[in-house]
Amino acid sequence: AQSVTQLGSHVSVSEGALVLLRCNYSSSVPPYLFWYVQYPNQGLQLLLKYTSAATLVKGINGFEAEFKKSETSFHLTKPSAHMSDAAEYFCAVSDPDGSSGYALNFGKGTSLLVTP
Amino acid sequence: NAGVTQTPKFRILKIGQSMTLQCTQDMNHNYMYWYRQDPGMGLKLIYYSVGAGITDKGEVPNGYNVSRSTTEDFPLRLELAAPSQTSVYFCASSRLRGPADNSPLHFGNGTRLTVT
């Protein structure tokens, strides 16, 4: 089964600084990749998803992610952090062969703290 | 549209009690999923369904059961609650998926369950 690894369970940045959240996937074929955000006591919201049409994917709230096959990475970035970006971020992957009904396999999450 | 609705939001159970977590979606999605979320562990797939009358086990199915009699509803049953089932449970749905379709999952707001 496909899996993802998120490097860093906690990331702290200053307001206005670059946000970089790392995600590496394990796959020998092009996977389906997603980033989700979870605010406290809420469900998960889709930030962006990878389609084979473009390696640089733009999402909501100014986030984007770049698919790098050579590095098996799909890191999430945002040029300038806002206080409202503080949340838990999850990278996820699903098997294009349909195993587990195309369910998403999630990384363990990265908690983003934004300081004034 | 309401999206994915989960009830109840919170519940405390005693060891050995039973309960059903309700999940309903109004998007006519065929694919539905149950996940549990534990701190620092990401989300783990419990059960999934690819359509009415069809269900299958995910990564952590022990102690749970599901049914899917309609497209809209996908309840999760805990028969003999154990402390290890203390968790936050999320239901998700997605439209028809396939090898060339990476539709995202839509999540409910979760049920926070404590077993004591």
Image (cartoon, rainbow, N blue to C red):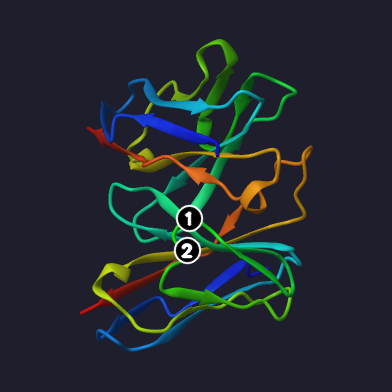
Residue that badge 2 annotates? B90
**In the image, residue A45 lies at what x, y percent?**
52, 50
Which residue is drawn at the image coordinates 32% and 70% (left, top)?
Answer: B85
User: Which residue in the rendered view is the most extreme toward the bottom?
Assistant: B17
Nearer to the camera, B85 or B24: B85
In the rendered image of this protein, does residue B87 appear above or below residue A71? below
**In the image, residue B99 lies at what x, y percent?**
77, 39
The quadrant the N terminus of chain A occupies is top right
- Three-letter code for the amino acid on which mark 2 is drawn: Phe
Separation (CA) of disc 2 from disc 1 = 15 Å
Horizontal relation, residue B107 to residue A31: left or right: left
Q: Which mark is residue A82?
A: none
Callout 2 and callout 1 share a chain: yes
Q: Earlier in the sequence, mark 2 or mark 1?
A: 1
- Three-letter code for the amino acid on which mark 1 is drawn: Glu
**Label 1: chain?**
B
User: Which residue in the rendered view is the most extreme toward the top?
Assistant: A70
Mark 2 element type: strand
Q: Tag 1: Cα neighbours inside 10 Å, few (<14), some, or many (≥20)?
A: few
Circle nearer the viewer, 2 or 1: 1
Disc tally is: 2
- State which quadrant residue A53 falls in: top right
Mark 1 element type: loop
- State which quadrant residue A109 falls in: top left
**In the image, residue B65 lies at what x, y percent?**
51, 76
Residue that badge 1 annotates? B59
Which residue is drawn at the image coordinates 32% and 80% (left, top)?
Answer: B81
Nearer to the camera, B19 or B88: B19
